[in-house]
Image (cartoon, helix red, strand yellow):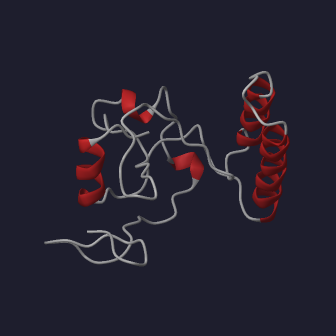
Amino acid sequence: MITPDGTMSGPGMVTGTVEGPDVPSHLKPKLTGLCRDNPATPEGKYLVMRRDGTIPNWPHFVLAASDPHMPAALRAYADSIEQDPDCHPDLPKRIRQFADECEQWRKENRTGDPTRGLHRKDNPLVILLMQQGHSA
């Protein structure tokens, strides 16, 4: 069950977030592919859920502001969507602005390690949800 504060609870689970210790990047394994490519984690790394509680059934890719490559990916997306005749002209501009905001966030907070593997303890309820849908 997802509690009002966004944490998970259920039979046999400790209520709250499940996170391991802060592992230094150099101790995490280097990724050789996507998490979903690893037979031990075919569900992927992230659970993506819509506001109505449904999980999209199409493949998706999650980028975080802590990833130093994320702003470049968003800017490339803005360049591509700008060519779509159905796109409102304000959307690419807003996507580029969001890329700038994320870049600023990373400078003020922390840089992630997108080329390193998993290091947090899995939450069994989240894994169960991921197995029922297509996660990232």
Name the foreground residue: 1 vs 43.
Answer: 1
Q: Residue 2's spot in the image, x, y percent?
A: 32, 69
Q: Residue 20's spot in the image, x, y percent?
A: 41, 64
| Left or right: 34, with 26 as reference point | left
Snapshot quadrant of residue 88: top right
| Left or right: 102, with 42 as reference point | right
Q: Residue 57's spot in the image, x, y percent?
A: 36, 36
Above or below residue 2? Residue 129 is: above
**How many discs appear?**
0
Name the foreground residue: 60 vs 18.
Answer: 60
Which residue appears at 25% of the width and 76% of the height? 14
Q: Hey, which residue is sitting farthest left in the picture?
A: 11
Which residue appears at 49% of the width and 35% of the height? 60
Q: Residue 130's spot in the image, x, y percent?
A: 30, 46
Which residue appears at 51% of the width and 58% of the height? 23
Quadrant assignment for the N terminus = bottom left
| Left or right: 14, with 78 as reference point | left
Above or below residue 20? Residue 113 is: above
Which residue appears at 58% of the width and 50% of the height? 25
Name the foreground residue: 5 vs 44.
Answer: 5
Quadrant assignment for the C terminus = top left
